[in-house]
Amino acid sequence: MMKKIDVFILSGFLGSGKTTLLGNIIKQEKAAERRIAVLMNELGRISLDSYLIEEGIPLKELYDGCICCTLQDKVEVQLHDLLADPNLDAIYIETTGAAHPVEVLDAIMSPLLADKLNYKGILTVVDLLRWSSRDTLSPQIRQLLLEQIYHADLILLNKTDLVSELEAAQRLFEIQSLNSKASILLTKNAEMSLKQISQMNLHPKEEHSMANMGHQLKLQTILYEFTNEISQTSFEDWIKELPQTVYRMKGFIQLKQYQKPVLFQYSYGTPLYMPQEMKLPLKLVIIGEELDTERIHQNLQKIENQS
C-alpha cells in the first residue's frame, strides 16, 4: 500500500504562539529522526517567519491571502510538490490568524490528494490574555476565536506565565464548556511533546457557521520597509499610541544600540526584541482592523527621520 503522510493543521489567532509551537515541534521531530515538511500561510505579501524553519526542512509558503478562501487553488499545487518526497513522514500547516480551521481542512482534502494524506487533527493555540479581553474585539474576530476553539482536536492555552493560576483555571473551564471533546493543555511558550500530539482526540467536524470567513473579516496587513536605524525610545512611544485594533506586528528593525537587526514581535500590547546574528531585510508587517495606512507610514518615516 502507498504510504500516507500525516498532516496536522496549526490554528489560532494572530500572535497566539503558532510559530513558536511549530519551532518546538520541528526540534522534536528532528530528534525522533522523522522527516517533515512545512506549509506556511501569511496574510501579507512577504513571510517573516520562514527564516525560523531549520535548513533542510522542505518549506512551501502561501502569501497575501488565506488558505481557506483566496488561496485554495494554490494549496493543492504546494502539497503535491511536498508529497513528491518519498521519505516524508508528516506535513505541518501553519495557518494565518484569520483562517477558519475547517475551511483549511476543506482546502487540503483535495480528491487528488486524499489517498496520500493521513489527516491527524487541528491544534489550536489560544492566547490567554487575548481570550480574557475578547469583548474588546470586533464581533467577527470574537466569532473566529470561538470557531477556532470549537473545531480543535487539541487546544493549547498558551502564555500561562502572564496570568495567575486562578485566571488560568477559569479560562480552562470556559474553554472546556465550548469544546469538551478536545484535549486541553496549559502551556508556556507553546511547549508540548509529540506524545501529547499523538494522543489528541480527533473528532468529526460539524457544519460550521462561518462560510467564507476570510471575506467577512476586515483584517488589514500593512508592510513598511525601513531604510535607517531607529531609536528604540521613539519606536516604543509610537507603539504606545497605537489603537487596540493593531493585533500583531512582526519584522526586523535596526535599533541604534545593536550592530545587527533585531526580530521584533508585538502581540496584545507587548513588544519583544530578539537580536539576530545576520543581516536581514528591515521590514515590518502590521496586522489589524480599521488601520490608517497612510498615517502609520508617516509616523514610521518620522521616527526614521528623527534618527
Image: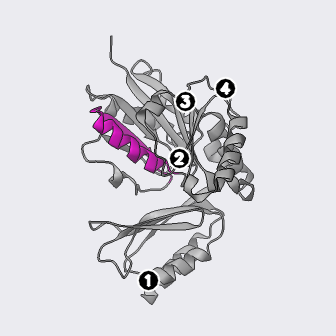
Which residues make up the magenta segment? 17-43
Residue 58 at x, y percent in the picture: 30, 40
**Residue 206 disc label:** 4
Q: Residue 181 appears in which quarter of the rendering?
A: top right
Kind of residue indicated by mark 3: Asp
Report the residue marked by disc 2. 187
User: At numbered mark 3, what does the secondary structure look like: helix, strand or loop?
Assistant: helix
Q: Earlier in the sequence, mark 1 or mark 3?
A: 3
Which residue corresponds to the image point at 62% horizontal and 52% vertical from the top-left? 128
- Cα separation, mark 4 vs mark 2, equals 27 Å
The answer to whether residue 153 is above or below residue 142 is above
Residue 277 at x, y percent in the picture: 27, 66
User: At numbered mark 4, what does the secondary structure look like: helix, strand or loop?
Assistant: loop
| Residue 301 visible in rendering | no
- Cα separation, mark 1 vs mark 3, equals 46 Å
Q: Label 3: few (<14), some or many (≥20) within 10 Å?
A: few
Q: Earlier in the sequence, mark 4 or mark 3?
A: 3
Does 42 appear in magenta?
A: yes
Which residue corresponds to the image point at 71% horizontal and 41% vertical from the top-left? 173
Of residues 139 and 129, the one drawn nearer to the viewer in this rendering: 129
- Cα separation, mark 4 vs mark 3, equals 12 Å
User: At numbered mark 1, what does the secondary structure look like: helix, strand or loop?
Assistant: loop
Kind of residue indicated by mark 2: Thr
- Cα separation, mark 2 vs mark 1, equals 34 Å
Q: Which residue is at the far bottom?
A: 306
Kind of residue indicated by mark 4: Glu
- Cα separation, mark 4 vs mark 1, equals 50 Å
Report the residue marked by disc 3. 106
Q: Label 2: few (<14), some or many (≥20) within 10 Å?
A: some
Does 254 appear in magenta?
A: no
